[in-house]
Image (tube, helix red, strand yellow):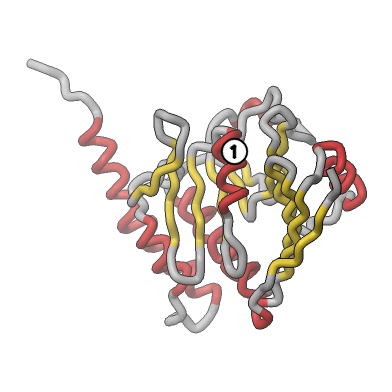
Amino acid sequence: MATVATTIPTIETEGDQLVVMDGVSWTGYAAFLRLRGERSRPKVVYLDGRLSLMSPGFAHERMKTLLRVFIEIALEGLGIQFVPAGSTTLRHKRKRGGVEGDETYYLRNLEVLRGKKRLDLRVDPPPDLAVEVVVSHAADDAVEVYRRFGVPEVWVCTETGLTFLLLDERGDYAASETGLAIPGLTADEARAWIVRDDFPGEIEWRRAIRRWVAEELAPRRDRRKGEAEPRDRD
């Protein structure tokens, strides 16, 4: 089947560039990754023969960075060990998918990752959390790849909202008010921190998050944990 390239219109002020090619074989996808080499751009998503190439603009990268900082401060403040995997290429031939998240995190199976230089989803577990930032393109293909890989939680962040998607018992994603990766955190709270602009600078913003995690989120997590623990019967 011939490969057809289609340029998707983008929002010029954001600087995003998106190209979609249909009819791309797995061999063609793998060849493109080899040609790109160690470069991180363009970001690539592959699903059932459709190859999407995206070079993000400033708005996308800014939102991605704010989310990364918020997530890592929250995890650290809650004492949750993690391994950030960034935009590592995750692919699986049998599942006909490949994806490079804006941010990905391992929160479990950390010993399995110790000393690894490459991830192979045929034997290695998928990340526990993936983040997709959407400015001028849909995240549908990426989310479907995460679903096939069994990623438990995906955050989809747009300029107007943040959605937590959790994998249910049927293997489908469903929106949830709270997530799994950061206990007790709601999507609305995370979104509120990302869009705040009432601080003099980045340092003050980060300090405020740390205080909020210590004074609000951590005690809330501990209360919920205590309520969930079984009580001894007399």
Q: Which residue is mark 1?
A: 127
Which corner quadrant of the image does residue 41 belong to? Answer: bottom right
Q: Is residue 39 above or below residue 222?
A: below
Question: Is residue 190 shown above or below 230?
Answer: below
Identify which residue, 214 or 65, lies in the foreground. Answer: 65
The residue lying at 74 percent from left, 58 percent from top is 20
Q: Is residue 90 visible?
A: no
User: Which residue does the image show at 78% across and 35% down from the upper left?
Assistant: 118
Nearest the viewer among 193 and 152 is: 152
Please state which amino acid type lies under the numbered disc 1. Pro
Q: Residue furthest left?
A: 234
- Residue 110 in the image: state x and y as whole percent: 60, 31
Task: Give how far across and how far down residue 156 sits, in percent.
Answer: 51, 56
Residue 90's place in the image compared with 205, above or below, is: above
Residue at horizontal 66%, vertical 45%?
Answer: 85
Q: Could you tell me which secondary element the residue under label 1 belongs to?
A: loop
Residue 223 found in image quarter: top left
The image shows residue 71 at horizontal and vertical percentages of: 51, 54
Viewer-nearest residue: 79 or 86: 86
